[in-house]
Amino acid sequence: MDNKEFSLQLENRTKKFAIEIVKLCVSLPNNSEGFVFRNQLCKSETSIGANYREANRSRSKSDFYNKIKISVSEASETVYWIEIIKELNWVKSEVIEPVYTEANELLAIFTSIANKIKSTQKE
């Protein structure tokens, strides 16, 4: 698989994940606490794919790296919110576990991309 094909697949994967998170957010409790989590989780998660898409259309390697670092940060925040939702038992395990797994996988992918770019910039 070449870089362009990988990029397109990852863009589609982040979009699919955003849709799953929105569905999850809709199922959160309809109270002030649920609203806070719904807002925070939807904002952080949708930013992952949006920034990756921006990175793929960047004007320079530096711009690409900066957008990827934002995706890393937002993925990390998304994992954080999902962990709290899991611990609060607001969502059934069979619903939250696949989302949690995907969030961690995306965090690992974007971290790997950022680290690879950083290591090539030092050379």
Image: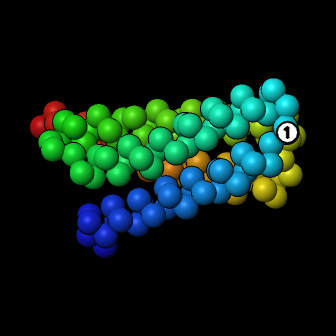
Q: Which residue: 80% across, 49% down? A: 27
Tell me where residue 31 appears, x and y as whole percent: 85, 31
Residue 99 visible within the image: no
Instruction: Indicate whether 73 appears above or below 45.
Output: above
Q: Nearer the viewer, residue 31 or 110?
A: 31
- Which image quarter: residue 115? top left
- Residue 36 left/right relative to 122: right
Q: Which residue: 78% across, 56% down? A: 95
Q: Which residue: 47% across, 44% down? A: 48
Query: How are the colours assigned in the image?
Result: rainbow
Instruction: Indicate whether 82 appears above or below 4.
Output: above
Residue receiving disc 1: 29
- The amino acid beneath tag 1 is Pro
Q: Which residue: 29% across, 46% down? A: 55
- Residue 79 left/right relative to 37: left
Tell me where residue 32 appears, x and y as whole percent: 81, 26
Q: Nearer the viewer, residue 8 or 102?
A: 8
- Residue 33 left/right relative to 71: right
Q: Nearer the viewer, residue 52 or 6?
A: 52
**Quadrant location of the N terminus?**
bottom left
Question: How packed is label 1: few (under 14 Cα within 10 Å), some, or many (20 or more)?
Answer: some
Q: Nearer the viewer, residue 30 or 5?
A: 30
View extreme (bottom): residue:
1
Tell me where residue 28 appears, x and y as whole percent: 80, 42
Residue at disc 1, secondary structure: loop
**Quadrant location of the C terminus?**
top left
- Residue 31 left/right relative to 84: right
Give the number of callouts: 1
Tell me where residue 34 appears, x and y as whole percent: 79, 33
Residue 13 visible within the image: yes
